[in-house]
Image (spheres, helix red, strand yellow):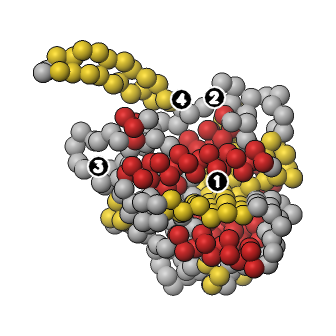
Amino acid sequence: MGEFWSMNPPGGGPVLDAFSPPTSSYSVTISVTSHGHRLAERTLTRQWIGTGVTHKPLTLAADKVYGDLFLPPPGTPRHPAVMLISGSGGGEFPPEVASLLASHGYPAMSLAYFGVPGLPPALQNIPLEYFTRAARLLASQPGVDPAHLVALGNSRGSEAALLLGQRYPALIHGVIVYVPSATVNVGYPSAKSRAWTDGGRPVPLGFIPVDHISGPVLAIAGSQDRLWPSETAAREITSGLDAVHDRFPHRALVYQGAGHGVDGVLYLPEGTTMRHPLTGAPTVLGGTRPATAAAQRQAWDQVLGLLAAL
């Protein structure tokens, strides 16, 4: 798949630019030329949604949450389900990941919690109750095993995923965090507000307790993350679970040479720096493109393995 993740844009630079594909499928033409003559050509289609997978957009008006719901084909035996929580850029976790999970048999919801019409414009005072409402909606879907609901969060979304696992263990039964934080941080982009509330009260800043999480925990990071110290946080999360003698499997996976982009979609060209969706400022992700692409692939196997073990 190297021809896919290593593609360069026709204009601009591969360090900063990234490719965002359509949710359903897209085509790539690969050609071989020699001295200006085309020797061979083939067009391939990358498809994100397996046969029979259903897709339902979720709206605030109808569902009280905003996102996309993907369910395996009707008649698929009940499986663990995954709620995907995005980071500080706002909007949804890439829905391609949710559709891929559903194509593997796991119902998945790609959730937005700020940065879209009808929701807060920034990561400020986000109520955890919004996520519990989404989790209960996901648990009620056909094909979902409500006893195995997993919260998956990346970057700032990792805080929400850990808090949900800790504070709502009867609802959330496992946590997967990409390039995580082990602490509750202030709001973003303004540091004058809190990021999260629970029961109408701000969630305290500082380390997130993990002694009540009632399921497996997988913390994934890159050793060259330049946005924040996710490697340290991943190890702190699992060390905290060790300290309370947690009985569920928990692991920190740190991929050498990978950056903050380890949470991306498989085999898509993306740079090691991005323009932050909320502020527009260049943001250094770190790592190299090859190492990050390899980490994405290996981490995906680990995520599927955790879900299969449930």
Question: In whole angstroms, how far apart are the C-alphas of marks 4 and 2?
Answer: 7 Å
Residue at x 66% of width, y 34% of height: 103
Q: Which residue is mark 3?
A: 14
From the viewer's side, name the closer residue of 51 and 179: 179
Q: Is residue 285 left or right of residue 242?
A: left
From the viewer's side, name the closer residue of 299 and 59: 299
The amino acid beneath tag 1 is Leu
Q: Which residue is mark 1?
A: 84
Question: In whole angstroms, how far apart are the C-alphas of marks 3 and 1?
Answer: 27 Å
Question: In whole angstroms, how far apart are the C-alphas of marks 3 and 2?
Answer: 30 Å
**Label 4: few (<14), some (14–19) or many (≥20) C-alpha neighbours in 10 Å:** some
The answer to whether the residues at label 1 and label 2 have Cβ atoms under 8 Å apart is no
The answer to whether the residues at label 4 and label 2 have Cβ atoms under 8 Å apart is yes
Give me the disc on residue 47. 4
**Label 1: few (<14), some (14–19) or many (≥20) C-alpha neighbours in 10 Å:** many
From the viewer's side, name the closer residue of 59 and 160: 160
Q: Which residue is mark 2?
A: 50
Q: Secondary structure at mark 2?
A: loop
The answer to which image quadrant residue 164 occupies is: bottom right
The extreme front residue here reads: 256
Pointer 3 or 2: first along the chain: 3
The residue mark sitting in front, 3 or 1, is: 3
